[in-house]
Image (cartoon, grey):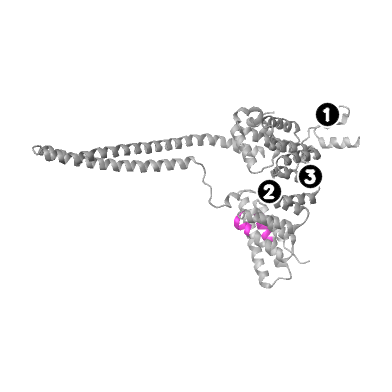
């Protein structure tokens, strides 16, 4: 049984190398996703502080305009400027939201690939392959007075009995001869 | 003699994972554990880190199974050096004494553990195992019953008690123990199936009906359980052949037995497809099922 189980392990080792490469790819994906998420968060914070600044300018702007009636063209330009700034910031806002969502999806997808096999929800399905071979073994109650104690014993070297040399590989037979002496 | 890793081209991580799988699923393949574990300990001890202590424990118990007392002794020495006052290591020393059949010394050791720590379950279980090894099954049963009165949730102990009762042919009490196990593990098809087998062994019409029901339950939980399928077939055939049943019950059971037969033949056909001897083995299965028919003598 060692041969079969360890041979599957050796086959798995070749697959393991491939799996390791694949998992480093998905780790890269998760890294990129997290970085994009952080970038989106940072730019959202920046955008918010920028919006605060432009709003302050909006509030102060009418007072200045009312004082300077000679600067009508300037007022128009600044108004156009404000409108232009509004659409740009709207687009930017939309872009940030899109980036956040995309980064989130990419991170989730990458994590699912790293985290390993999904298990069935069904409690009985993981027992499908269990057999009585392993169920009946209770490690806390193991007994040692079984034939393994004799079967695996190394043959005792007894130079006085010549028959012992003739049968070195059969410890049970040796024991029988011992009993006769 | 080439090492395991050369022979099978596996790395030390795979050997360590294999050992962990064997440990977690209670495999008792001691020869392999000794081979793999000995090499891990001798060659890759530094890479294992803290895993090495639990591997020492696993290899020591396997070495006792394989009569490798030298290896067991060295593992025990390493563990004693690392954990000088541990009860767990003392228990391992006791297990080594048990393997050498020095039961009085082992008992003294376990008594000293229990003096220090009266709630230590491992030492109590080893004392029960000593009684069992010495052949004193009735005392072992009594002690195990007392243990279970205090530690009602110990599934291993319930299963061990059921096995002890089966050895004593006290099937009613064994069924009770298995009922406890089924209550706490309702999704485990193996307990259902073992309970059904005990009921089938007890015999009598009600027990056979109960056995058939629990075989069906085991099949519901795991439709690949061949023993339960055979059990269903046998119990249904027995009930159908019994003289005390009504005609309707007889008809129903003949139907169940026929269904079980078809499932068994199909399973053997599926298992043997693509192999040359398929036709012969399928025929053998059919002949076997026919010969298992309960005939009135």
Left or right, residue B223 beside residue B81: left
How many numbered discs sit on the rendered protein? 3
- Kind of element beneath mark 3: helix
Disc 2 packing (10 Å; few <14; some 14–19; many ≥20): some
- Kind of element beneath mark 2: helix
The quadrant of the picture occupied by the N terminus of chain B is: top right
Q: Is residue B288 above or below residue A16?
A: below
Residue at image location 51% in from the left, 37% down from the top: A19
Residue at image location 69% in from the left, 44% down from the top: B119
> Which residue is under mark 3?
B133
Residue at image location 72% in from the left, 62% down from the top: B293
- Residue contact between numbered discs 2 and 1, judged by CB atoms under 8 Å: no
User: Mark 2 vs mark 3: which is more N-terminal?
Assistant: 3
- Residue contact between numbered discs 2 and 3, judged by CB atoms under 8 Å: no
**Location of residue B84 in the rendering, given as x and y in whole percent from the top left corner:** 69, 31
The chain ID associated with circle 1 is A
**Location of residue B160 in the rendering, given as x and y in whole percent from the top left corner:** 72, 49
- Kind of element beneath mark 1: loop
**Location of residue B172 in the rendering, given as x and y in whole percent from the top left corner:** 74, 59
> Which residue is under mark 2?
B156
> Which residue is under mark 1?
A157
From the viewer's perspective, is the residue at label 2 or at label 1 nearer?
2
Q: Main secondary structure of the magenta part?
A: helix
Disc 3 packing (10 Å; few <14; some 14–19; many ≥20): many
Of residues B105 and B9, the one nearer the viewer is: B105
């Amino acid at each position: 049984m060692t041969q079969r189980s360890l041979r599957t392990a050796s086959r798995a080792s070749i697959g393991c190398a491939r799996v390791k490469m694949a998992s480093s790819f998905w780790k890269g994906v998760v890294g990129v996703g997290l970085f994009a998420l952080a970038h989106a968060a940072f730019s959202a914070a920046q955008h918010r502080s920028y919006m605060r600044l432009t709003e302050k300018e909006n509030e102060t702007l009418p007072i200045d305009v009312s004082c300077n009636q000679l600067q009508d063209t300037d007022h128009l330009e600044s108004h156009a400027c404000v409108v232009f700034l509004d659409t740009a910031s709207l687009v930017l806002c939309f872009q940030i939201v899109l980036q956040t969502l995309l980064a989130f999806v990419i991170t989730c997808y990458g994590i699912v690939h790293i985290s390993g096999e999904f298990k069935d929800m069904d409690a009985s399905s993981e027992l499908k392959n269990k057999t009585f071979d392993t169920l009946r073994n209770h490690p806390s109650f193991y007994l040692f007075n079984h034939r393994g104690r004799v079967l695996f014993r190394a043959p005792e070297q007894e130079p006085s009995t010549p028959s012992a040399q003739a049968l070195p590989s059969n410890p049970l037979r040796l024991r029988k001869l011992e009993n006769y002496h | 003699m080439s090492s395991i890793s050369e022979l099978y081209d596996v790395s030390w991580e795979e050997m360590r994972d294999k050992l962990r799988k064997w440990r977690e699923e209670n495999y008792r393949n001691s020869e392999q554990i000794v081979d793999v574990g000995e090499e891990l300990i001798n060659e890759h001890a530094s890479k294992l880190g803290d895993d090495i202590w639990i591997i020492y424990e696993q290899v020591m118990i396997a070495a006792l199974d394989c009569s490798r007392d030298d290896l067991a002794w060295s593992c025990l020495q390493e563990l004693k050096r690392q954990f000088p006052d541990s009860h767990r290591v003392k228990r391992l020393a006791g297990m080594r004494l048990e393997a050498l059949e020095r039961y009085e010394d082992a008992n003294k050791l376990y008594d000293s553990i229990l003096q220090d720590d009266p709630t230590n379950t491992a030492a109590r279980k080893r004392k029960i195992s000593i009684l069992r090894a010495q052949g004193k099954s009735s005392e072992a049963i009594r002690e195990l019953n007392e243990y279970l009165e205090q530690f009602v949730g110990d599934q291993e102990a319930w299963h061990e008690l059921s096995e002890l009762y089966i050895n004593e042919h006290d099937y009613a009490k064994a069924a009770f123990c298995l009922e406890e196990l089924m209550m706490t593990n309702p999704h485990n098809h193996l307990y259902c199936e073992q309970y059904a087998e005990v009921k089938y062994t007890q015999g009598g019409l009600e027990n056979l009906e109960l056995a058939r029901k629990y075989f069906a339950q085991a099949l519901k939980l795991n439709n690949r359980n061949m023993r339960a399928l055979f059990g269903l077939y046998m119990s249904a055939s027995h009930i159908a052949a019994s003289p005390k049943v009504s005609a309707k019950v007889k008809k129903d059971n003949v139907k169940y037995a026929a269904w079980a037969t078809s499932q068994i033949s199909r399973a053997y056909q599926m298992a043997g497809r693509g192999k040359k001897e398929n036709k012969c083995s399928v025929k053998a299965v059919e002949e076997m099922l026919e010969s298992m028919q309960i005939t009135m003598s």
